[in-house]
Image: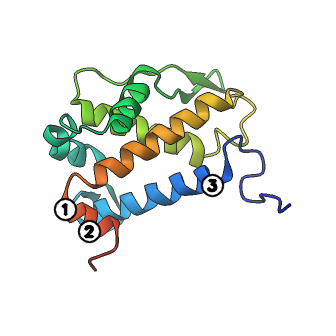
Amino acid sequence: MQENIVFPQVSLPEQLTYEFLGTFARCEYGLKCSGFAKGSQKSVEADWDKFATSIDWHFARVKDEHFKESVAYLLTEPPRKQVLRGGRIEWQESAPDVNLPKSQQTLLMVRRVRNNLFHGAKVWSPERSNDRDRDVRLVSSALIVVKGCMGLRRDLEDAFSFRVF
């Protein structure tokens, strides 16, 4: 049995962890290459909010049941975020702003899932969740949503799939 030395304490299935992080990275690359970028000559990052508003009409009309269930889960059971309170890192409930378009709310939760996983909160933090089923469902839902969103714009789907460049 090969030991997982990259994420030695992650409670998620290794394949799901790699698939989510790899898919998210491809998505950010695709966004930046498709005009959904913000920054300057010093740095650039994916403009998730601009992308979310550009797909909102299509997002609301997706018929796939897994996609709709994943969106509902991310919005009704949103991932918590880490905050600094009194010099200590703590988890805080943080629902999305209901005044934003649903696509923007959802993609914000997808980014939070990514941040919690990538920045170590789900791996090394003593406050990490012990609720493996919830963590698996959050990451699985975020993966379904991000994959679904990439197909809502042809130009982004091409960049995401590396069919251009």
- Identify which amino acid the numbered label 3 is placed on: Gln
**In x, y percent, where is residue 83?**
56, 28
Q: Residue at x 33, y 65 (%)?
A: 160
Q: Residue at x 23, y 39 (%)?
A: 62
Compared to residue 16, the image places residue 90 above or below, namely above
Residue most extreme to the left: 57
Q: CA distance from mark 2 to mark 1?
A: 6 Å
Percent of width and height locating residue 99: 22, 22
Q: Nearer the viewer, residue 75 or 39?
A: 75
Q: Give the secondary structure at mark 1.
A: helix
> Which image quadrant: the N terminus?
bottom right
Q: Is residue 115 visible?
A: yes
| Mark 2 vs mark 3, CA separation in Å | 24 Å
**Above-or-below relation of 143 to 131:** below
In the rendered image, which residue does mark 2 sit on? 158
SS for tag 2?
A: helix
Q: Residues within 10 Å of mark 2 (few under 14, many from 20)?
A: some
The residue sitting at the bottom extreme is: 165
Location of mark 3 (residue): 15
Q: In the visual, does 82 lie left or right of 62?
A: right
Residue type highlighted by circle 2: Asp
Q: Quadrant of residue 103?
A: top left
Question: Quick check: 155 left or right of 140?
Answer: left
- Give residue 77's position: percent from left, percent from top: 47, 22
User: Please, which colouring scheme is shown?
Assistant: rainbow
Q: Is residue 43 visible?
A: no
Earlier in the chain: of badge 1 and badge 3, it is 3
Pointers 1 and 3 in contact (C-beta within 8 Å): no
Residue for badge 1: 154
**Residues at badges 2 and 1 in contact (C-beta under 8 Å)?**
yes
